[in-house]
Amino acid sequence: MNLIQFKKYITKRNVILATFSLLMIIGLICSSTFSRYKSLEQLEAAAYLENFHAIARLYYIKDGETDRREATINDEGYIELTPKEFETITVDVEYTGKAKTYCRFKLDCSWIRHDSETVPDENGKTITHDYIELVPHDYPEYTCSDEIYNNVEKDGYFYFNDILESEENAVEHYNVITKVKSVGKDVEDLIDPDKDYSQRVRVSLGVDCVQYNRVSELWKMNKLPWW
């Protein structure tokens, strides 16, 4: 191989190496870009799966009022109402999100009676103790909107019949319990109209949403109650 042939060989070899290196660099960039966008898609998918929110609010009509007033949840996480107040309650659910979800909510009620007793202490004096007595009760009866399936006596939940989905994360409002038909026969028999304010019902609210195709996985049921 003479000098001219050697120079041509070196030039050709450099071109091949340069081309190969350039292709490697392009490949790495494409791979990195693809991985980056794949990761973004995965993040977006994860966010989409969790892109819903729901909350239940309880309202009642105050004595002498015509407008609904939202009941206040105390520091212990429940609402305490008199029997008269409980008979006027309605419940709304606010839903926000673009993911298609099934939604259910629970309205737990515990009837109690506030009372006190006076007992002598060790010094011969008297001490008054306040206490709460649990009142046995049947399930209250409710009038629900057409959108709700009442499955309370079987699993404690009210279910939305249809899939929920809002547009552009707008807040959707649903009036789900429209009226209390009965507080429960056991409670009605024990309520003393003259001592209405010595008795209370403690109410707690909870809402549970699940992506529409994950009912069996997260709610552990093969089909929804009305299917």
Image (cartoon, rainbow, N blue to C red):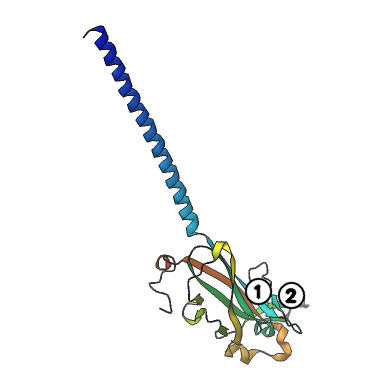
Rendered residue at 48%/74% (across/down): 162
Could you tell me the amino acid type at mark 1?
A: Ile
SS at mark 1 in the image: strand
Q: Residue furthest bottom?
A: 189
| Left or right of 189 on screen, residue 214 | left
Q: Which residue is mark 2?
A: 122
Query: Is 7 located above or below residue 122 in the figure?
Result: above
Whether residue 140 is visible, yes or no, is no
Q: Residue furthest right?
A: 125
SS at mark 2 in the image: loop
Snapshot quadrant of residue 8: top left
| Left or right of 159 on screen, residue 57 | right
Residue 50, image x and y in percent? 50, 59
**C-alpha gap between disc 2 and disc 1:** 38 Å
Q: Which residue is mark 1?
A: 79
Rendered residue at 40%/68% (across/down): 216
| Left or right of 124 on screen, residue 137 | left
Query: Is 39 located above or below residue 165 in the figure?
Result: above
Query: Which sits in the foreground, 95 or 199?
Result: 95
